Amino acid sequence: MRSAARDEVDGLWRCELRAGTTALPSPCLVVSWTGVLRDCARVPLPSPALVSWCPSRGQTWWVARTWALVLAAGAGTRFGAVAGGASKAMVSVAGRSMVGWSVEAAGVACDGVTLVVAPSMVEEQYTGVDVIVEGGDTRSGSVRAGLATVPGDVDVVVCHDAARPGASAGLFERVIAAVRGGVDAAVPALAVSDTLKRVPEWGDSGGVVAGTVNRSGLFGVQTPQAFRRAALVAAHDGEPEATDDAALVEAAGGTVMAVPGEAAAHKVTTAADLVVVEALLGGRGSGDGL
Ligand code: CTP
Ligand code: MG
């Protein structure tokens, strides 16, 4: 056992379970679980044999604290100019801003929300946001800016593009559950439905097809993406760049799980995407206009 100290509140021993744990004092409150499930299990006298099953056997346990980073600091170049010079993330869809939808879903599923915005948006008022921080020049830089604001006792961090306003709270919960289950990261994925061609050189009038890619086993991934905090922090070491964070965790040798995605979590990249998401979100009703 790595650490044990008498808990000041209820007299239990506070314990951390790790690989190689051979004994625990009794009675004990397990406060850490092999780096994945923290703030964790109130278990009756776990022995080494019990350690491997205690959460899944339905004991009473407190799950890891979760924190969402809602990324809204992009320039929206492909979307084009927004009236009044506003950011793409503040564009309204189905009655409220993309930021408003994204923050709401994140807040339902997570214990806290950091909103990462462009410098021009820092002074705005936002509902349901715990921390507002200025983003970086790239998406990866914005994630790092957000990550720096996450409280120390959080173990699962969820990165979400504000440009996916249709992602439901249930989708956040699905990726979080997968990380709690023991993987380093979890991403929503939808099977690719278009036929895929390789076009090595693409010019103004198109390009010559070099071949067709077998799409079986190919998935498009979305956000929210959930991470074991330590895995996300390690993956960002050295300030690497990628279009999503799961790619960085993969590159660092981590285990990434794909879970079923949602059509409504479609990303608003161009103005045409707004029409698609508007239609997908229309039935949910509008919020408070944020
Ligand atoms: N993002 C960010 N900080 C950046 C770049 C992107 O927070 N420096 C966020 C965007 O606000 C968006 C998400 O990352 O919610 C996905 O990025 P993307 O769809 O590419 O949006 P933009 O970068 O804003 O658009 P574009 O690439 O066309 O400029
Ligand atoms: Mg971009």
Image (cartoon, rainbow, N blue to C red):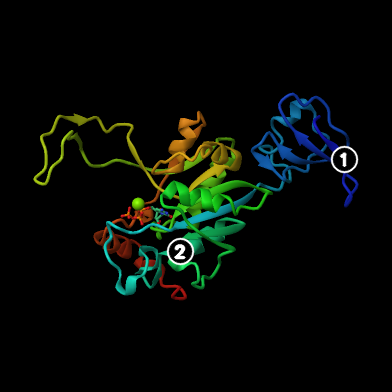
Q: Quadrant of ligand 1?
A: bottom left
Residue 169 placement (x, y as % from top left):
50, 57
Point 43% across, 58% down: residue: 73
Foreground pick, 185 / 89: 89
Amino acid type assigned to the residue bearing label 1 in the image: Ala
Quarter of the figure with residue 285: bottom left
Residue 143 placement (x, y as % from top left):
49, 49
Q: Is residue 101 left or right of residue 149?
A: left
Q: Which residue is mark 1?
A: 5
Residue 93 placement (x, y as % from top left):
35, 68
Residue 278 placement (x, y as % from top left):
32, 65
Considering only order in the chain, which callout, 2 or 1, is on the residue closer to the N terminus? Answer: 1
Q: Secondary structure at mark 1?
A: strand
**Extreme-left residue of the structure:** 205
- Residue 119 is marked as 2
Point 22% across, 42% down: residue: 194
Q: Secondary structure at mark 2?
A: helix
